[in-house]
Amino acid sequence: MSRSGLAEPRSLPPGQRLTPVLRTVQYGRVPRIALATWSLRIGGDTLDGEALSLSWADLASLPRTVVRADHHCVSRNTTLDLLWSGVAARTIVEMAPPADDVAHVLVSAARGYSTNIRLEDLSSSRAVFATHLDGEPLSPEHGWPLRLVLPHLYGWKGPKWVVTIDYQRYVERGFWEQRGYHLTGDVWREERYSYQE
Ligand SMILES: Nc1nc2c(c(=O)[nH]1)N[C@H]1C(S)=C(S)[C@@H](COP(=O)(O)O)O[C@H]1N2
Ligand SMILES: [Mo]
């Protein structure tokens, strides 16, 4: 039944509460990155066995997309309506496709952070390697030059300062997945901890 005249309250994922600003959350310090030497490497179990490296100029030549999404940190803070723009993760996956039996991907960042993502989550239509937030280039704290955004997964599944994508036939847990967090991390299924797997 619709309640005319009243705005429909927006549904929050289970166990989350609203926070008005996107708080910076990371393990360790913000890395310094030079675009001239930066690259995004897609390797591991690729279809042709070769790794692909994209320079910043290569990345800039790819088609761009915009995704409006809410951010959900597993610490229970949710921030609504962030506008991410960059390159669809699908575009990158299609440029360097995985071998047929690959189901997982380890995405790693400068300074050692990593996270495991199911290939089907990385290939979902709203997954984006973002260069911009709300129309501005990412700030260093929010992941400049490139961060992954997966709106239906908890925030830890979106590395800031992404540098490598490794397709994996076998599951390798990333930074938080080794420390008790869930392998898949779906926000709407409330997949927070590894004991739920
Ligand atoms: N490289 C890296 N990326 C990271 C993290 C991190 O510690 N290192 N923390 C994650 C977590 S837990 C969240 S909630 C978001 C926070 O993004 P923000 O700092 O832009 O708000 O970044 C994610 N990406
Ligand atoms: Mo988080």
Image (cartoon, rainbow, N blue to C red):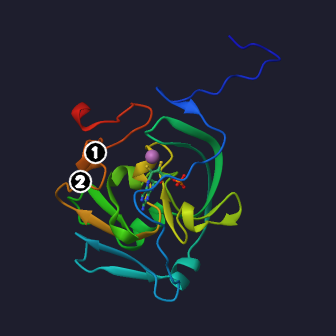
Furthest residue toward top: 1
Classify 71 as above or below 91. Answer: above
**Quadrant in which the C terminus is drawn:** top left
Element at badge 2? loop
Q: Name the image quarter holding residue 93.
A: bottom left
Discs 2, 1 touching: Cβ within 8 Å: yes
- Residue 163 lies left or right of residue 100; in this view the side is right
Query: In the rendered structure, which disc, 2 or 1, sits on the residue that comes first in sequence?
Result: 2
Q: Which mark is residue 173?
A: 2
Residue 29: x and y in percent read 45, 65
**What residue appears at the point 39 percent right and 71 percent down from the top-left corner?**
110
**What residue appears at the point 18 percent right and 60 percent down from the top-left corner?**
169
Q: Which residue is mark 1?
A: 183
Seen from the viewer's position, the closer of residues 50 and 181 is 181
- Residue 8 lies left or right of residue 130; in this view the side is right
Residue 164 seen in this snapshot: no
Residue 191: x and y in percent read 35, 34
Furthest residue toward right: 5
Classify 142 as above or below 126. Answer: below
Seen from the viewer's position, the closer of residues 180 and 127 is 180
Residue 23: x and y in percent read 57, 48
Seen from the viewer's position, the closer of residues 111 and 55 is 111
Question: Disc 1 marks which amino acid?
Answer: Leu
